[in-house]
Image: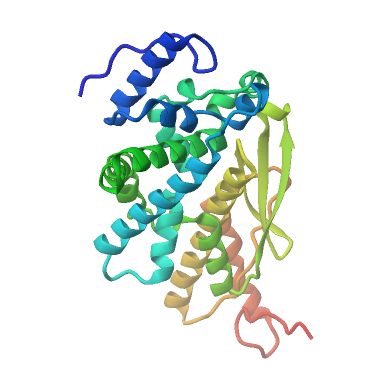
Amino acid sequence: MSTPKKQSSRASGGGPDNQASSHTLLEGRLGYKVESALLVRALTHRSYAYENGGLPTNERLEFLGDSVLGLVVTDTLYRTHPDLPEGQLAKLRAAVVNSRALADVGRTLDLGSFIRLGRGEEGTGGRDKASILADTLEAVIGAVYLDQGLDSAAELVHRLFDPLIEKSSNLGAGLDWKTSLQELTATEGLGVPEYLVTETGPDHEKTFTAAARVGGVSYGTGTGRSKKEAEQQAAESAWRSIRAAADERAKAASATGAAPAVDAVPLTDGAVPTEAAAVEATKAAPAAGTAADGDSMGAPSASG
């Protein structure tokens, strides 16, 4: 289906003709014509509603669309991965149905340019906020469901999200770095990760920096537009560092018959770990274990 030329008007302004033209453009990208009043509501953020006398917002449609999206994605994962356990299916679904992923899909539709926003949100970059884009996309899916039925809504979800589902199926640990890090640190006996987060910048353009720490030791840092994004990046950095160290220990143990202990790879503030640093830190473990008086090589001392 050919896409009409984009109009320059914003959804928060303009008369009925501009609004109708804007809706036609969005419907062309969706592949469905949606009843006008329903589409208007799906695109009405609460900030616009409150500034214009308490109009109906898109929040009820968002609630409905969230359920439709979740059902279609869950059904797809269940049918295409018959051998995956429930926990892995849940990770896959979380990688697809989350605010960041939905916002990215919304950006492919240029959804932000169609949203009816209040002046306050408009002035603070609301058209590109992940939460607003994600909520509006769910509301649009809810509107398609009400107007066209489940089959049409499911077809829309498949067209928009199947590429992301396929990509997520190949991510492995990257499905959820925080969960993967917690599983790895438990396996290695390091303890439970914690995240120290700082933020900089104005309210509408904050940058978050997170440090992933385990047992008081920093293993990785990350930055992002949200706290969650920064923590995921920090978790990925820490996971790769600890995984590299564990792999090196396994190689050393295989070569010598030893079982070196897990040593922390501390970071100075703001430093980013590398696999080389993690590997170097673990090379000292066998030597330390050899010096232990009568104990098994590299075994950690009792905590009392």
In the image, residue 220 sits, relative to residue 217, either above or below, namely above
Pick the front one: 230 or 269: 230
**How is the rendered protein coloured?**
rainbow
Looking at the rendered structure, the number of numbered marks drawn on it comes to 0
> Residue 237 versus residue 24: which sits nearer the camera?
24
Horizontal placement of 274 versus 138: left or right? right
Percent x, y of residue 15: 48, 9
Image quarter where the C terminus lies is bottom right
Tell me, yes or no, if residue 246 can be seen here. yes
Q: Residue furthest left?
A: 1
Residue, far bottom: 294
- As drawn, 237 above or below 290: above
Q: Position of residue 88 (x, y in %)?
A: 40, 65
Determine the image quadrant of residue 159. Answer: top left
Measured along the vertical axis of the image, is residue 140 above or below residue 299? above
* Residue 220 x %, y %: 61, 51
Residue projecting furthest to the right: 304
* Residue 74 falls left or right of residue 10: left
Q: Is residue 224 left or right of residue 8?
A: right
For the point 61% across and 60% down, which residue is it?
A: 281
**What percent of the width, then of the height, locates residue 6?**
36, 13
Which residue is painted at 29% across and 50% down in the image? 166
Foreground: 256 or 162? Answer: 162
- Hey, which quadrant is residue 101 in on the image? top left
Placement of the N terminus among the 4 image quadrants: top left
Residue at x 53%, y 27% (from the top left corner): 128
Identify which residue is drawn at 67% across, 39% down. 208
Q: Can you see residue 242?
A: no
Tell whether 217 sits left or right of 172: right
Residue 225 sits in quarter: top right
